[in-house]
Image (cartoon, rainbow, N blue to C red):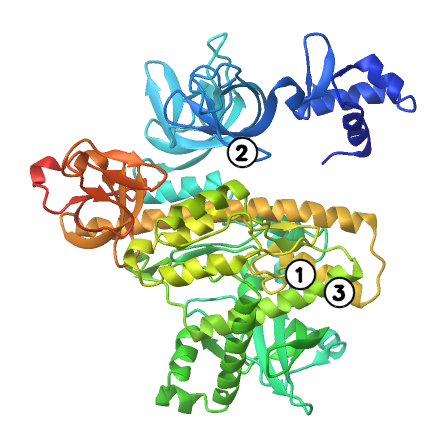
Amino acid sequence: MMDELDSRILAQLAKPARGDELAKALPDVSKRNLAAALDRMTRAGLLVRSKKNKYGRAEDFGCMRGTFLATERAFAFVSPENGGDDVFIPPRADGGAWQGDRVLIRLSDTPRDKNRPEGAVVRVLERAKKDITGTLRKRGRAFFLEPDSGKFPVIEIAKNRQAGGQPGDKAAVRVVFWGDDGKRLPPQGVVTALLGESGSMDAAIAAILHENAVFDAFPNDALSQADACGDTVDPAEAARRVDLRDKTIFTIDGDDAKDFDDAVSLEPLENGHVLLGVHIADVSHYVTPGSPLDDEAWKRGTSVYFPGHVVPMLPVALSNGLCSLNPDVDRLTFSAFMELDRDGRRHKANFAKTIIRSKARMTYHKVNAILAGDEGLRAQYAALVPTFEQLNDLTHTLRRRRMERGALDLDIPEAEVVMQDGQAADVIARPRGDAEKLIEECMLLANEAVAEYMDKRDDPTVYRVHENPDPEKLRAFASFAKQFGYRVDAGKPQDTAQLQAVLNGAKDKPDQRILPTMLLRSLARARYDAECIGHYGLQAKFYLHFTSPIRRYPDLVAHRMLFKALTAQSFTNADHVFCAEAAVQSTLREQAADNCERDVTKLYLADYMSRFLGEEFDGVVAGVTSFGVFIELPNTVEGLVRIEELPGSGWEFDATRMTLTARSGQRITFGTPMRVRLVAASNITGQIDFVPADQPASETH
């Protein structure tokens, strides 16, 4: 984050200038402070210092900042920070950069390919990671780590830095020296954790968790604080709150959920409106700022879920106990009350600290069955059925209004691994019925209401934001969608109706099933921010996360800031700084959790499929690349058919149309049906390989 002096220096640099020239232009700045600022800005890549000792903006010297994207070959690419095409980095021009590093590069005036920008790394500005996982190896007297990813170099380990590890062990290594190509000195590291025997699925999972800084064990001080909260609500605290224990309030979650942090209620009002109540576990009452629990929640940022397991943000004593809205017990909550008319318009929103006693722990499966007319379940939950039906009607109204304002409905099927006795028993497309949509709409409404309240008061909090799509990426999507007959004007990103028209048209069309995924990739990634800049995908002017403080740190921050606003407490500059820092930290931890969940799930999918080696399946092409095609099965599992395994010869890849065409004229594109045979599935790498079913067994390897 730039400070005021940095901004003043940049303002003076309409053209490169020497340090003494800047000193004259900024007479109120001491030479010491100016020199420190210039050094800091140069190290950050904001400025470049020429051989003539002139300082200038990076772009003034043909430089730019970006993220280093390694390949498993000698060359690499850099993704510019300010957008634009990736820059090709030829062999021996990486400047010692590793995968994910933030770097400063200088663009070449004479690129090898005139149609592709080329450059060389000038300096590594920031290392992406210091901990690398892989397998310990020994060659002669040399002991080293062979990283799991070929995008990282081999790391040498000194004898006294091996932590008892043996060749063949999976391990985590902390890099202590990044190497020096000029002096032919290899990178060096220290073994920090032994993760199991290389080649086992458990070790592969442990490596993924460690790489993403996801750890099961909590520090003792955090566990002690959680245990000290007890397992019942303090009567004195209950007496200070709005008492909702006699109200019809219930939770609706997945069958396997253990932590219930949101409950809902619906009451008719005399004016013909309804009062929707969204009641959220009051985690902020127990997790106080600066406490051991808060420090650990900050580090984790979010709970991490993968098949059969959860790594919670808070200790189980809170996440599954005192903060979980279990039925028939008193629980402290923070409630949002929204008055809605029959057309779903919100007229009022109020917020209060409350105490509830949930009347039922409902599941999506049960509520979906009740709404579908299951007589047995309707009789069992007769007292709640009218509320379910009223909420369902309201949900459809709210959803219709959201779609009318331009929200995007990116309903992309996700694979769900069904676990049994610790093993993957099945893989299905995750269902999404009326009950799931009911809870989604209620939570969205509460999140918007809290965000609007805080933004209109100009009080600090953490918002959930989603920027407009990058014009270049949207143009690429428009070009791709055009071949299916859709017209998308990339110059009008706010016209989301044209994008929704593509999504609606692609439904139930196998040859167009890639379009929602392609659109998703063209959109910006949602993140957290201290400024309310809106949410593009939801077309919401105000939005934040309020409804899951058990498992998301930004929700916990939103609770704290909302309570300060409601109780007229004064906000300080420290509150604003804290929210800005919490937004950055929460975004980073969310990305790490997403990476972890995706990579571990891939291992379980491959492990499940490995029992079907040699069997044939009907699938469709879900991805086309220069090296082969990805085939998606009806259960959503994807595997690769390598280009050399395809029948025919002379296959050419068209990146614009995303097709492969053989010399014979045979064409493969998205949605092309293909019967395949499974030939490999690794629960160590997550790789699944198919070959065309009519290919003789002798040709598979």
Q: Is residue 353 above or below residue 665?
A: below
The residue pinned by badge 2 equals 84
2 and 3 marks in contact (CB < 8 Å): no
Q: Earlier in the sequence, mark 1 or mark 3?
A: 1
Judge by depth and name the residue closer to the eye, 123 or 474. Answer: 474
The residue at which mark 3 appears reads as: 563
Q: Residues within 10 Å of mark 3 (few under 14, many from 20)?
A: some
Looking at the image, residue 559 sits to the left or right of residue 139; the answer is: right
Q: Is residue 571 visible?
A: yes
The quadrant holding residue 240 is bottom right
What is the secondary structure assignment of the residue under circle 1?
A: loop
**Residue type at numbered disc 2:** Gly
- Asked if the residue under mark 3 is in contact with the one under mark 1, i.e. CB atoms within 8 Å, the reply is no
The mark found on residue 80 in the picture is none
Q: Indicate the amino acid at tag 1.
A: Phe
Disc 1 and disc 3: Cα gap in Å? 18 Å
Q: CA distance from mark 1 to mark 2?
A: 29 Å
Single out the residue that lies furthest toward the right.
Answer: 28
Looking at the image, can residue 323 be seen?
A: no
Within-10-Å neighbours for mark 2: few <14, some 14–19, many 20+: few
The image position of residue 500, as x and y in percent, is: 47, 60
Type of the residue with mark 3? Phe
Residue receiving disc 1: 542
* Residue 404 spot, x, y in % from top left: 55, 69
Which numbered disc, 1 or 2, marks the residue that appears first in the sequence?
2
